[in-house]
Amino acid sequence: MNISVVIPLLNEQESLTELYDWIAKVMQSNHFSYEIIFIDDGSTDNSWEIINQLSQKDSQVKGIRFLRNFGKSQALHAGFEKAQGDVVITMDADLQDNPEEIPELYNMIVSQNYDMVSGWKKKRYDSVISKNLPSKLFNYAARKTSGVKLHDFNCGLKSYHRDVVKNIDVNGEMHRYIPVLAKNAGFTKIGEKVVQHQARKYGETKFGMDRFIHGFLDLVTIWFLSRFGRSPMHLFGALGFLMLAIGFAFALYLGIDKLYVNPHGRLITDRPQFYIALVTMIIGTQFFVAGFLGEIILRTKENKQRYLIKDELNI
């Protein structure tokens, strides 16, 4: 199979049939073998009924329905697990991503040997204040922190070599940072393509300003995991050693001063250096304990069920 199109969605009943027709037209005109996997992330409208109708009409349409809303990252993870194509294309279901971009995204993976290609919505039709400006700040911070030189990390339209989606773990809300996850996994040939962005045709956006706050917090998380995720003791142990060294230095100073320099002076417990020594030693011990616990958790981590699937179609 040439292409798997993975489409996570939440309450997009108005756009699904039109999106399917558009994708099918592009695939057939380019003679691709393909599948379209819709992941219904707990929709409360008639989205699943429409996916069911499409799958009955076309066996290349497949569907996964979650028991409730688990988030876009979990939906992508489920779609990646089921995808069978040599190239996996992800896109949003709101018709803001243009399926006409699929052939070029496919060719960049197959012919130019990219591991993944991210879309860049250079010209956007979103609100400048609520989306454009925060998105630019977010993407700037992501570039500087991760070292991945992309203009639009959050663009839903991306293409991947099959090996990439089968070897990265998209969890939490890390769908924004799939390029960073791919880089950390060793897939370093990451490209970018300017893609057409279209104004939302139906309904309203499912994301508010809080997604950028969450995005920056996730950026800190992924930076930490990429640097210290495999050995948290390297960070916490270093901080613990520093705190203990400071505490020991103050305690040594107090001891020498009390025993040899000023034995009849103030009590040690009346001096501020005593409390500095005490606090830094306690903090240092806590850092060491955190590092040990992190190492233990890392080595005993079990795979947990991250989402519950209610129905599947043609899978």
Image (cartoon, helix red, strand yellow):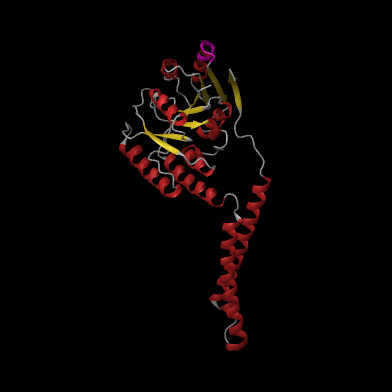
Horizontal arrangement in the rendering, residue 102 relative to residue 55 (left or right):
left
Horizontal arrangement in the rendering, residue 106 relative to residue 56 (left or right):
left
Which residues are the magenta region? 54-59
Q: Residue at x 35, y 42 (%)?
A: 136
Q: Position of residue 307 (x, y in %)?
A: 59, 32
Q: Position of residue 86 (x, y in %)?
A: 53, 27
Seen in the picture, residue 42 relative to 73 is either above or below; the reply is above
Q: Is residue 192 magenta?
A: no
Horizontal arrangement in the rendering, residue 183 relative to residue 136 (left or right):
right
* Pick the front one: 253 or 266: 253
Horizontal arrangement in the rendering, residue 154 relative to residue 273 (left or right):
left
* Pick the front one: 302 or 152: 152
Task: Identify the image quadrant of residue 271.
Answer: bottom right
Q: Position of residue 36 (x, y in %)?
A: 50, 21
The quarter of the picture where the C terminus appears is: top right
Asked if residue 264 shows in the view, the reply is no
* Pick the front one: 174 or 127: 174
Task: Identify the image quadrant of residue 158.
Answer: top left
Q: Position of residue 56 (x, y in %)?
A: 54, 11
Seen in the picture, residue 111 relative to 254 is either above or below; the reply is above
Main SS type for the magenta part? helix
